[in-house]
Image (cartoon, rainbow, N blue to C red):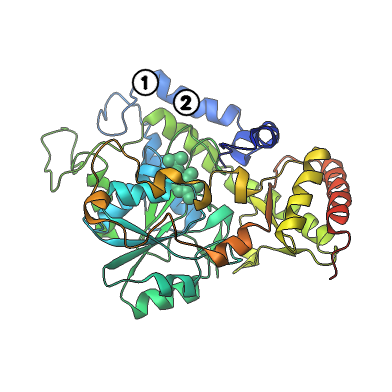
Amino acid sequence: MKLINGKGARLTLRSLTNAHMPGTELFGEEERKEVMDVLETGVLFRYNHDAQRKGHWKAKDFEAEIAQFTGAKHALAVSSGSTAVSTMLAACGVGYGDHVIVPPFTFVATIEAVLWAGAIPVFAEIDDTLCLSAEGIRKAITPNTKAVLLVHMCGASADLDGILAVCKEHNIMLIEDTAQALGATYKGKHLGLYGKMGSFSFDFFKINTCGEGGVIITDDEQLIKNAEYLSDHGHSHEGDNRGMEPHPILGTNFRIGEINAAIGLAQARKLPYIISQQRKHKAIIQERLGKIPGLAFRRQCDDAGDSATFFHLLLPNEQVARATAKHFAEAGIPYGYWYDNMYHYIKQWDQVKNLSMPFRMVAHELGLPQDLHTLKFPQSDAVMCRLISFNIRVTWAEEELDAMLTKMEGALRKAMEGVSV
Ligand SMILES: *Cc1c(COP(=O)(O)O)cnc(C)c1O
C-alpha cells in the first residue's frame, strides 16, 4: 500500500524500505518477455492494427487472464485503479448529486472518484472487519442514496451478507472498489462479483503491478459495454477501422496501453502462487501470534478467502497499540499504524474535509450532507487506534519469518505488560 504521510515520516520511511508487495517481489523474466512481444511490433495501442500486431493482444489477454482467475464473465482493463472506479460509477449511472456511501478507511482515490463523478460522498462507520459495516451503512442512508461504494480493505472481504441485505432492503446499488483485494473471495466467489461491478488496481503497491493499470470485472454484459465505451471516447470497437465505427455514447480516455497490459498479464499469471504463499505464511503467523493472551486480530468474514496480503493486529487499547508500534520500530519490524502515520484514514484527509479542488465541483454547489469538520467516527476510531498491520511477504524463507515472529512476540509481550486480560 502507499506509505505516504505527513507526520511520523521516519517510521514510515523505515516501513517503505522494508515494504515488499508481492508483484514487485516476483518481478522478472516473464514480464520482460511479454513486453518484448509488444516492442517487436511497436503496436502500443490496444485496439485495431490487426495486421501489424502479429497476433499480440496484450490488453485482451490480460483481461482474459483476470476474468478466468476471478471467474468473472467480463473484464475490462483501464489505465489505473482510480479510473476503474470512475468508469464503474459512470457505467452504473452514478452522477450528479447522487449520494454514495463510502468508508472513512480506504485509499483516498475511492472518495476522489465519487467527487469526480459529480456525486456526493457520505461516510459511514467501519468495524473490526476493517470495512463498512451493514449497520454503519444503514445509518448513513439518505433519500438520495444511490450506491454503496464498498472497499474490501487490505485484501479481505467485508460482511457481504449483511451489506447486501441492507442494499436490497433500501434499493441501493452495491459497487465494489476491490483495488486491494485481488485474489480474495467470499463464500467461494471472488470479491467484485457481488456488486454491480468490481475494480482492481495494478499500481506499484498492490498485489500485482503493471506500473499503472486497473481492471473492472462484472457478469453484466450491458455494464461492461458501458465501461468499454466510456473508457475510450465512446468507440464501439467494431471492425478494424477506428473512428468509423459507431459511437453509442460519449466517454474519455481511460485506456490501458499494451506495454502496461503486457506486464499485467505476466503478473496475473503469478497470482495463484502469490496467494498460496501468502496464505501459507499467514497460517504460520496466526499460529504463533494466536498464542499471545489478549491479542486480537482483524475479524474475518471469510477467513479462508482472505488474499492474505496483510496481517492485522488489534491491540487491547490505543496506549498498547502505540507501545507496540514503538517496540516494533526499535526491533526493526516493518509495520503500519494507520491511525496516525499513514494516509488511509479520514483523520488525515484535510483536503477532503475542505473539498480542496482548483475547480468548482458538484459537491461545492450542492454541499455535503455531513459536516466533515465536526463529524465523529467513534466506532471506526475505536478500531483504527488499536490496529497495527504488516505485509505478508511471498518470498520469506521460513527462518526469516521465524526470526521476525520471535522479535514480534518479544515486542508484543513488552507492549502488553501490565494489561490485564
Ligand atoms: C490503490 C487504490 C485505488 C486506486 O488505484 P490506482 O491504480 O493507484 O489508481 C483505489 N481504491 C483503493 C481502495 C486503492 O487501494
Sequence-wise, which precedes: disc 2 or disc 1?
2
Mark 1, secondary structure of its residue: helix
Is residue 215 visible in this depiction of the protein?
no
Mark 1 crowdedness (10 Å alpha carbons): few <14, some 14-19, many ≥20: few
Q: Position of residue 125 (x, y in %)?
A: 50, 65
- Say which of 30 and 307 sits in front: 307
Q: Which residue is mark 1?
A: 41
SS under mark 2: helix
Q: Residues within 10 Å of mark 2 (few under 14, many from 20)?
A: many
> Which quadrant of the structure image shows residue 298?
bottom right
Point out which mark residue 408 bears.
none
Q: In the picture shown, does residue 194 fall above or below 406?
A: below
Residue 229: x %, y % from top left: 22, 45
* Residues at marks 2 and 1, CA–CA distance in whole angstroms: 10 Å
* Identity of the residue furthest to the front in this view: 374
Residue 325 visible in rendering: yes
- Between 43 and 87, the one nearer to me in the picture: 87
